[in-house]
Image (spheres, rainbow, N blue to C red):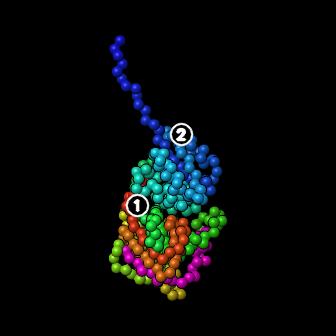
Amino acid sequence: MPENDSEPERTTPPRRAAVVINPGKSGGPELQREILRLCETQGWAEPLWLETSIEDPGTGQARQALEAGVDVVIAAGGDGTVRCVAEVLAGTTTPMGLVPLGTGNLLARNLGVDISDPVAACRGVLTGSERTIDVVKATLDHSDEQQLFLVMAGLGYDAAIMADTVDVLKDRMGWVAYVEAGIRKLPGKPVKAKISVDGGKTVQRRIRSVMIGNCGRIMGGVEIFPDAKFDDGVLDLLVLAPRGRFGWLGVVAGIFGRNKRETDSVEYFQGKAAEITLEREQEFQLDGDHLGAGTHLAVAIDRGALTIRMAG
């Protein structure tokens, strides 16, 4: 009989995901069981399940996932979890998936990810395709440590809202809780600011807030950066400088009005980098996380640095 020279058929190992999950927002073990079943039915291996903690809200878990060589790291939680995972994955070839949990989920909203059904969002990760988005690197008070954000950073009024929003109200009322804090924080004094975009001419303003956007929409679906795109390599700056008794009406008109750029209380700038210097400390936030106070903020876009895996 002739010899059988055929080589044994080689099988490709199934792909594997890591799930970096905030246990405080997961709703219990049922979600884990559903994601395990989903991976099985889609032909993926059992996922690496990594829970965040107060001490480590996601960066250590994301590094562990990278070391394990998984095919995708799924950030399952709110904006803070997403930001921590993205800080590790940015600049690598490993994609990030999104399973939105909690109240904000701003990146997921801007990308069109289903925020109402975590299992559906996870299915989109497993069966979807990859795309790249920009990230923004921020340095507060000339620190040696850069921090990353995906949606928005802010100095002043908006960051004070994040710092003062009551957690119990966030859990019960969602984004409406931020409105409540915003009303309480309306009274306040402006601060002198120097703002430079792309190293150009410095402008001086008396501001209540400077916001830097990588995406357009924030809480409640409000679009405050109408020209922002998460893959255009451009930063969008919004300067809020209400003047006089009716200054905040000018802010409302500038953000929500038909002619968004035509008001003395609101200015928009665009560029690849920006620097803001304040005469006194103001609160500081990244993607809704209050991170203290400072007088200097430098930001720069890193185009296409993060790969996202999602449906569509």
- Indicate the secondary structure of the residue bearing disc 1: strand
Give how far apart the Cα atoms at labels 2 and 1 are: 32 Å
Q: Which circle marks residue 40 in the picture?
A: 2
Give the residue at the far front of this rendering: 144
The boundaries of the magenta stretch are 177-197
Identify the image quadrant of residue 277.
Answer: bottom left
Please tell me how crowded label 1 is: few (under 14), some (14-19), or many (20+) other residues with Cα within 10 Å. many
From the viewer's perspective, tell me whether residue 216 is left or right of residue 189.
left
Q: Residue 207 vs residue 168: left or right? A: left
- Left or right of 83, for residue 133: left
Density class for disc 2 (Cα within 10 Å; few <14, some 14-19, many ≥20) is some
Q: Tell me: residue 111, above or below residue 257.
A: above
Q: Secondary structure at mark 2?
A: helix
Q: Which residue is mark 1?
A: 134
- For the point 41% across and 78% down, the residue is 195
From the top left corner, tell me how far across and down residue 296 is, in percent: 45, 75
Instruction: Give the amino acid type for the residue marked by disc 2 in the picture.
Output: Glu
Q: Reading the chain from its start, which is encountered first: label 2 or label 1?
A: 2
Closer to the camera in the image, 75 or 236: 75
| Residue nearest the viewer, comparing 131 with 251 | 131
Q: Nearer the viewer, mark 2 or mark 1?
A: 1
Q: Amino acid at mark 1?
A: Asp
